[in-house]
Amino acid sequence: MSEVLYRKYRPQDFGEIVGQKSVVEVLRASILKNRIAHAYLFSGPAGTGKTTVARIFARAANCLEDSPEKRPCNKCEICKEFFSGVGLDLIEIDAASSRGVDEIRSLREGIRSLPFRAKYKVYIIDEVHMLTKEAFNALLKTLEEPPAHVIFILATTELEKVLDTIISRTQHFEFRKIMEEDIQKALDMIVRKEKIKVDEEILSIISVLASGSLRDAESMLDQALAASVGELEEEEIRKLFGVPARDLLLGMTKAILERDIKSALWIVHKSSEEEVDQKSFLKLLIRNFRFMLYLKIDPAYEKELANFISESELNAMKNFAKENDIKKFETVLNNLNDAYPLLKIAYLQQLPLELAILKIAGQ
């Protein structure tokens, strides 16, 4: 059985982390200066590297390499133990399944003992917001007076559910959604290493659908590879993920800009018949109108866009940008962006887009 891509290409050191430059710089500096805190909190969307960075930092803090600049070396005994998962001084806890006060009390008992081999015992508590109130209070007592040989790294996708008293006792790092271009570069690196022929536009589509999560993008690429026979074809990928065809997107763009309600609603209906995912449809529409806004403001942006869309789409967008003013693009983007979160609660998936079209036409 082949290893899934997000595990196979999981970053192994700080230099391989994608899209979290400010976080990496501060953590790297703390290793270089040997100013390691007793507790860290990593918050942010799923798939942005929180657990991966936590593991790298755990290795770096305990690495036996003499030069701090080279930590983690991933070659010393401690790095190898932590990396393979057999190191007794790296304890990972999934708060989603171990969320009670008894588990935290057990943790408090464990931190009293010295590390077995490493300098620090590192506790990584994933999805820490899932802990019960009693467990949070028990953890708080632990964070107030931790032993010098212990490092806590808490990770969460829902910061608002973490007690302020917990946050105040940690160094908080906020992980951001990863930019589409960074995700696309990472995917491009993977397909080159895997020696797979893939059209750049396919990677661009996956990067958009991943919504800032590199892990999701890698999983989607894995799914696409598993579903394809031979070389990845663009049409194949569009059908697999419910992505609208180019002519459907361009037709909708034209209809919206011309306030042609009849044609726009017909395209929505057609997209539904063709089993197009409306979330993907709306995402790509927003992206394309944003691209056109940039082209309107600065035509030189064309060089950048060439990395994401086909030549025919780029030419069409350039024409749309010339023919329409900035205000119109602003109006469209505001209405489409407002429609996007409504997809979760809509009675029909196509309804938010239909209502957005009516609003745009009336403005």
Image (spheres, rainbow, N blue to C red):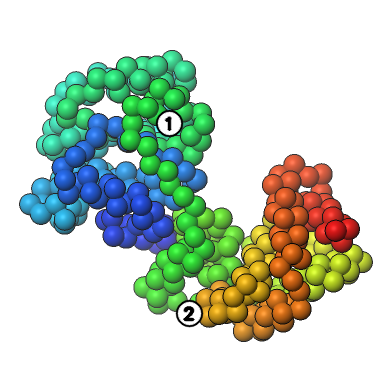
Residue 226 visible in the displayed image: no
Label whose residue precedes the other's in the sequence (1 or 2): 1
> Which numbered mark, 1 or 2, is in the foreground of this view?
1
Q: Position of residue 228 (x, y in %)?
A: 56, 71
Q: Position of residue 100 (x, y in %)?
A: 43, 20
The circle drawn on residue 128 is: 1
In percent of the image, x 48 and y 79: which residue is there?
Answer: 197
- Which residue in the protein does label 2 denote? 197
Residue at the extreme right of the image, as rendered: 262
The amino acid type, in three-letter code, at marker 2 is Lys
Give SS at disc 1. helix
Q: Position of residue 9 (x, y in %)?
A: 36, 61
- Position of the N terminus, as image quadrant, is bottom left
In percent of the image, x 18 and y 52: which residue is there?
Answer: 71
The amino acid type, in three-letter code, at marker 1 is Val
In percent of the image, x 68 and y 62: which residue is there?
Answer: 286
Per the model, the C-alpha gap separating discs 1 and 2 is 41 Å
